[in-house]
Image: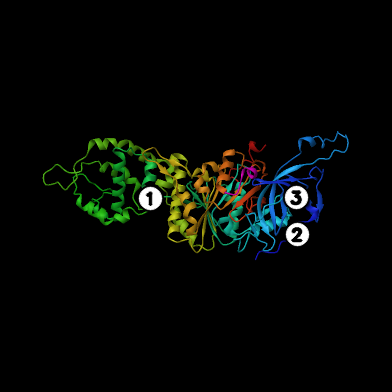
Amino acid sequence: MAEPIPSYPFERSRYLGSVSRVSPLGVRVNFPFATEVAPSQYAGHRVTRGQVGEFVVIESFGSAIIGRITEIQLPDRDRLSVEPERNEGDEVANPIGMIKLLGSVDLNSNQSSRGIGEVPRVGDYVYLAHPDFVRHAIVSTKGTKGGLIEIGHLSGAPETRISLSPASIFGRHCAVLGTTGGGKSWSTARLVEQVAERGGKVILLDPTGEYHTLKGRVRHIHLGGTRDSEADGREFVSFPYFHLTEMDLFAFLQPSPGVQAPKLRDALQSLKLVQLEPELLDVDSSILIKEERPWKPVNRAIVTHDRALHAPSAVFSFKDLVPQILAECVYPTSNKDGMKSHWGGRHQNSYDSCITLCMRITTFQKSQPMVPIFAPPEYMTDLTKVIEDFLADPDTAVLRVSMRYLAFEQHTRELVVNAIGRYLLGRARNGDFQKVPLVVAIDEAHQFLNKSIGDENNKVTLDAFGLIAKEGRKYGLTCLLATQRPRDVPEDVLSQIGMFVVHRLINERDQLVVINASGVLDQSTAAFLPNLRDGEALIVGADSIMPMPIILNQPVNKPRLEENVDMTWMSA
């Protein structure tokens, strides 16, 4: 049973007008008092007489129909009646307006729903919705249970606090959308703080480093970067190359399809094989030499270790990749007598064709930005080990992975973040998050979703977080996506989102994507998006009967970039 209705929805003091026309798109209403200069006050609340954006209640038999004013106008014959300089007769303005129907509240069960039990009739009375009644319509939606998270207050009514259940916000993923400066980062930080406060676990992927202000049960790590000195207290982590898939490495190294790609694949297999069976190595050699060597022991070892060779994160030595590729450039069989079961000598054409590939690999090995991937120093811990420790640590609620030091070259960020998502999804499929669900928050999500990288022969689709959005919640793994470019996020991913926090959006393509994905927002409601104030957002959720304009609570620790411009000429 829902909680009692906190205020009578049809108070005469909140009367606005009556219905004059009804259609499937909404209702037209007479607003006889809409031209009053100033709003009135009743019971401590501001009472407007008809203002675009206000929520209203239409009196119906057994239910209160909730709507929102989307348009108010004067008929052409009355348009001059509001001019103060005209004083000709007793002209009376007769404003009319349109109301978009959003849902209803059953006055018997006190439950709210998106459906309209009985369509309004011509002559039905329309009242300004009391803020407490709007709050009741939100929290009394079927499915809202358990402890609630206070997210803010209704726009224009600071005393009306809005709270939603954690399942409503994160149960089917959450997306925070909005242009730069609208409050997107603050909302993301607030939601992360609320998860931590309730004993949840969050892995926050921070591309810019602006969430370094988070405090409390937070562990801050840096993916990449250089330690200033032995006294540097920051924790640096790496994401070693062997956590990448073969196609990820192909996207990095871009081998040509004719000779280089098969030789690179063979070299990777050989390096993994000698890690599993070191007996195949020659004395004082770290690579598998094939020239004029028998291939039966190698083939037997490949069959024996087939599962381990194709397992995720199979270890191999990247520094030995160049000599191993060159060692693969041999004839498949020897032409010498009695050596038919041996590889032959060097195949010079293949050897020459692989030189450019080896040069690219050498460049990666010596590249400073690629150090956390291909040559991590000893002070860098493997990120997957840090994640394991974090999940097992009951005293840490948030793991912030700062990527401000991670290079953009060769799509390094995109490939690494996609690999992190793939690793988390693998753990989720193993049932690791069933008892303590994990939220993975990713800022600037448009950089990592709906992208294909690599050339036409080595194309990699960054689909890890798309798969998490589609299937992760059944394993206890949910997403918190924050982006300023919803149009760059796949529509099939956004369609899996259960809660949208939509800050100011100006681009019409972004608005259209949100309209199509939410299933609740329409053009008339989306028209309010470009005019939202800083910190104001429309909350569109699966458990809410209507989009709600809310001023969100500020986070305890406000995000900001680490670069200090306050002491420079830019602050003048």
Taking the view exactly as shown, the residue that stands out farthest to the bottom is 1
Callout count: 3
Quarter location, residue 37: top right
At 25% from the left edge and 54% from the top edge, which residue is drawn? 301
Q: Which residue is mark 1?
A: 242
Q: Is residue 379 visible?
A: no
Q: CB under 8 Å between callouts 1 and 2?
A: no
**Quadrant that contains the N terminus:** bottom right
Q: Is residue 333 shown in magenta?
A: no
Identify residue type, mark 1: Phe
- Give residue 525's position: percent from left, percent from top: 64, 45
- Give residue 378's position: percent from left, percent from top: 42, 52
Q: Residues within 10 Å of mark 3 (few under 14, many from 20)?
A: some
Looking at the rendering, the stretch of residues picked out in magenta corresponds to 519-526
- Give residue 572's position: percent from left, percent from top: 67, 36
Q: Which residue is mark 2?
A: 8
- 288 or 102, nearer to the observer: 102
Q: Is residue 521 shown in magenta?
A: yes
Mark 1 or 3: the one toward you:
3
Quarter location, residue 506: top right
Left or right of 300 on screen, residue 486: right
Mark 3 or 2: the one toward you:
3
- Give residue 77's position: percent from left, percent from top: 79, 35
Mark 1 or 2: the one toward you:
2
Q: Which residue is mark 3?
A: 123
Identify residue type, mark 2: Tyr
Q: Is residue 537 visible?
A: yes
Cα–Cα gap, marks 3 and 2: 20 Å
